[in-house]
Amino acid sequence: MEYKDVNVTSVQQLYTPKDNVGIELQASATASVFFEWASALAEDGISPQYEVLFDKVGGDFSKPVYSQTSDDMGLRSYATISHKTLDKVAQLAGFGSGEKGSLVWTVRSSRGVVQQRATVVRTLTVTRLLGFTEIPAQLFITGEGSEGGTDVSKALAFASPASGEFTIFTKLEAGKKYHFVSGKDTEARVFYTESGKLKESSTGDGAATVSETGIYRINLDFNISTVAMAKVVSLGWFFSPSNKVDIALTYQGNGIWKGTGRTEFHQEAWGRDERYKFEMVYDRDGTRLVSHWGPTNPSLDSRPGDNEDPAYFNMQEWPTSQWNNKWKLHGKFDNQMTTFTVYLNGEGVYRHTVELAQ
């Protein structure tokens, strides 16, 4: 039996959405836009299949930025396209998060290998979602200005304290570019910051720089596409009885600080006082900010045992105070040279270790 290509006509009319309609995309999972057009005809009388094509304004659909088959696996002369998908289309067309821009759309009919593009085109204006509809499961920092340089295999991981939120403490080099990636492979998505906003690059380009070399805390919120950055001025061992930092910690790389000093407990009428925490000083756009890092259990009030659960040393950020949210040192550290190591990175929970100095 000889196979013969079947001719198919192009779509002659687009019904909905109307030309130049504007749509403000919503984050709801059920939000969608209904696209409908006149049916095409196939020579053998069997229903053609359809795809909705999207392109940049001025594009000719020869390489559409996105295409989607119509409902019922391409057999219907209509398509229900979610706002989430339209946001992806707008991103592929180069629109930033929350930005407004125009796309053109049309329909391609096909029967077997024969395809026909509609003779009519419409414009659709969309306002992208402010946040990201597809939030990466993990995030890394890379680029010339980052600690790992341009070798993405050495990219440092962010921590993710909450859904859609990522934080990293890392050194950045002044004037050298850095960006963020969702993985360490060639298929990873690329993100960057611009004017306080988090954006995704559709081309793999896009980067940011800092004006001063230093240790930075970077907070990214994919839920609302924002970035907050502050330069870490210092981190030190805060001894509650003296109400100040008594041992400075120096940055080692990969979100790790380390410092050594003598830990002489303070004599009180009731005994020896060994309460401590860590103090971090930031600079955010010229404003000095101070926070304390203490235990995740705010009611903790006991010394660690010889075989203490490592969770005792887990840490989180707290408002400043002299006595609240503190740990206690084991008795063996009284009047000894002690080394503190703080881990604020994506390789595990935020934590610290306490050891007798070597």
Image (spheres, helix red, strand yellow):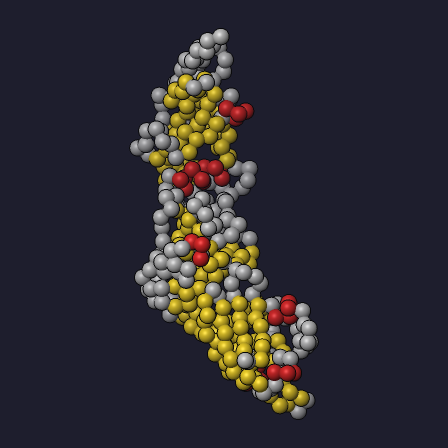
Q: Is residue 181 in sight in this rendering?
A: yes
Instruction: Name the image quarter holding residue 312.
Output: bottom right
Return the x and y of residue 230 as percentages of the image width and height: 42, 65
Q: Relative to 163, does residue 264 appear above or below in the rendering?
A: below
Q: Would you identify the image quadrant in which residue 283 lies? A: bottom left
Q: Nearer the viewer, residue 151 or 273?
A: 151
Foreground: 180 or 316? 180
Residue found farthest to the top: 1
Q: How many marks?
A: 0
290 over 50 or under it: above or below:
below
On the image, the x and y values in percent for residue 1 come to 49, 8
Left or right: residue 336 versus residue 131 is: right
The percent coordinates of residue 311 (x first, y second) are: 64, 67
Q: Is residue 323 above or below residue 226?
A: below
Name which residue lies at 43% across and 19% down.
Answer: 113
Residue visible at 51% across and 55% down in the picture: 165
Residue 177: percent from left, percent from top: 35, 57
312 relative to 227, above or below: below
Considering every residue shown, the one lying at the far front of the view is: 358
Q: Residue at x 55, y 40 (%)?
A: 29
Whether residue 180 is visible to the viewer of this picture, yes or no, is no
| Left or right side of 300 for 77 | left
Query: Residue at 39% across / 68% down in the picture?
Result: 214
**Between 155 and 217, which is closer to the camera in this rendering?**
155
Which quarter of the rendering shows the C terminus? bottom right
Residue farthest toward the bottom in the current orientation of the protein? 269
